[in-house]
Amino acid sequence: KPHVNQVEFHVGMGTAGPEATDDRDFNDAEGILYQSFSPLCGPCGTKELVTGEFVTKIGKKYGKTGAQVSLKWQVQQGIPVIPKSNHPKHQLQNADLFDWELSDEDME
């Protein structure tokens, strides 16, 4: 039995229907860790989850970046993320997710 299922998952996919979740409910039921790779949608060809208006507006409420909001949205659901960065500043921001919470409204 696999222990980890790495899937591309990010803000916006949770409402895209069952095909977009790669059977997250099944993984949870079977005790398989559901882990997100490309949580900022790098292969999508957009920076919307990093600097887009939606995530940056939410980020301003918390003093965080849009990227931090996108990552926190997953981490707060119990989904480990694997963000990629070779910039020390971004690496520190990526790790700064655990001393704050998004509101229920912002999680929707």
Image (cartoon, rainbow, N blue to C red):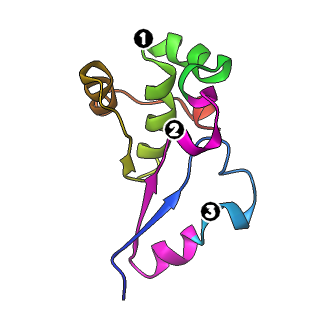
Q: Specify whether 44 is left or right of 9.
A: right
Q: Amino acid at mark 2?
A: Leu
> Can you give x and y, in whole percent of width and height, for residue 20 in the image?
68, 60
Q: How far apart are labels 3 and 2 at the CA level?
A: 16 Å
Q: Specify whether 27 is left or right of 17.
A: left
Question: Which span is picked out in magenta?
Answer: 24-49
Q: Specify whether 16 is left or right of 100.
A: right
Residue that badge 1 annotates: 63
| Badge 3 density bin: few <14, some 14–19, many ≥20, Cα 10 Å | some
> Can you give x and y, in whole percent of width and height, for residue 7 in the image?
51, 61
Residue that badge 2 annotates: 40
Comparing 44 with 91, the one in front is 44
Q: Residue at x 55, y 68 (%)?
A: 24
| Labels 1 & 2 near each other (Cβ < 8 A) | no
- Toward which corner of the image does residue 48 lie, by quadrant? top right
| Badge 2 density bin: few <14, some 14–19, many ≥20, Cα 10 Å | many
In the rendered view, tell whether residue 103 sits above or below residue 39.
above
Task: Identify the disc placed on residue 97.
Answer: none
In the rendered view, tell whether residue 5 sits above or below residue 84.
below
Residue that badge 3 annotates: 21
Q: How far apart are labels 1 and 2 at the CA level?
A: 19 Å
Q: Amino acid at mark 3?
A: Thr
Q: Residue at x 45, y 52 (%)?
A: 37
Q: Amino acid at mark 1?
A: Gly
Quadrant where the image shows the N terminus: bottom left
Q: Residue at x 40, y 75 (%)?
A: 32
Q: Earlier in the sequence, mark 1 or mark 2?
A: 2
Q: Specify whether 82 is left or right of 60.
A: left
Label 1's element? loop
